[in-house]
Image (spheres, helix red, strand yellow):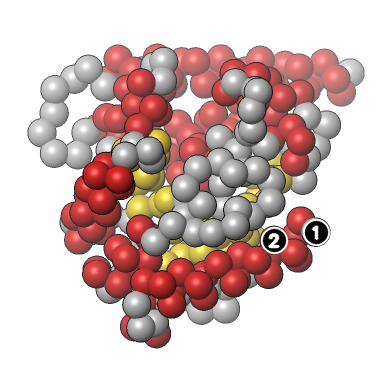
Amino acid sequence: MLPLLQLLRKILGWVDMIVFTTFLYLLSWLPWRGRHPVAWFFHAWCRTFVRALGVQLYLHQKNRQRLPTRYILIANHPTAFEDIGIPALFDVVSLAKLQVKDWFITGRITRTAGTLYVDRDDPASRHQAVQVMIDAVNGGQNIALYPEGGCKGRRLFSEFKSGAFEVSLRTGVPILPVFLHYEAQDDFEWQPPYTLPQKIWHMMKTVNPRVNYYVYDPLDPKDYADRHAMKAAAYALYQRWNQQYLE
């Protein structure tokens, strides 16, 4: 009886997801000045997507300080799930790779929701993205990005990019570090040769759907001499958490 209930729950989850996605996709064609109505529903849509996948997403508040109302969220980036997992839990606008803009159906939804984009292989685009993020932060938005510069695997990459830390120093808005831990790493990690649909399928059929997002104390830009010092401090923290949770 239990497997039948689980199957029914999954079916209802996907029906809910498909209906919500259809609604947002149609809504995205509505001309609108300013913040589009799709943005109002985007975080709820992400939570619906998480439920449809059957992922058990847990937020662990490791922070000792009260979290700021304005922040620049950074996280490690082992899989594509973060694209819905982070906005499912945090009120952020994400910086995504340019190719996301053209994804079938969801690309239009993320575009209309206000997602920021960058061509990671183009230095001019990366430079422009910094200014776009600064404008977004100065406009009152919280943003989220991944300083590894893309999905680099289950273990922490060898370096961080400087963009998030430059934005923090130039706006005075703190960095909020979040460490992502997928217990079934093989099922969630997005690396070649797998495509995104294949990884979604792997996530859905994993025997361990538990995902842990650990939030730590923010990094105040006033405590650092420059972006390089701030980046080094953040990377050292992620090295420690990588060893704690993944080694």
Q: Is residue 109 visible?
A: no
The residue singled out by tag 1 in the image is 247
Coordinates of residue 220 in the picture (x, y in percent): 39, 78
Could you say whether the residue bearing mark 1 is in a helix, strand or loop?
Answer: loop
- Three-letter amino acid code of the residue under disc 2: Asn
Observer-nearest of 154 and 140: 154
Could you say whether the residue bearing mark 2 is in a helix, strand or loop?
Answer: helix
Observer-nearest of 191 and 174: 191
Coordinates of residue 78 in the picture (x, y in percent): 62, 43
Please report the residue visible at 39 percent of the width from the left and 61 percent of the height from the top.
Answer: 162
Coordinates of residue 66 in the picture (x, y in percent): 48, 75
Question: Is residue 116 shown above or below 11?
Answer: below
The residue singled out by tag 2 in the image is 242
Q: Tell me the quarter of the image containing the C terminus.
A: bottom right
Are dots 2 and 1 in contact, CB under 8 Å? yes
Q: For residue 81, which numbered disc appears in the image?
A: none
Please report the residue visible at 24 percent of the width from the left and 69 percent of the height from the top.
Answer: 170
Q: Is residue 120 visible?
A: yes
Observer-nearest of 122 and 41: 122
Q: Is residue 225 left or right of residue 180?
A: left
Please report the residue visible at 44 percent of the width from the left and 57 percent of the height from the top.
Answer: 161
Crowd around label 1: few <14 · some 14–19 · many ≥20 (10 Å): few
Q: Tell me the quarter of the image containing the N terminus.
A: top right
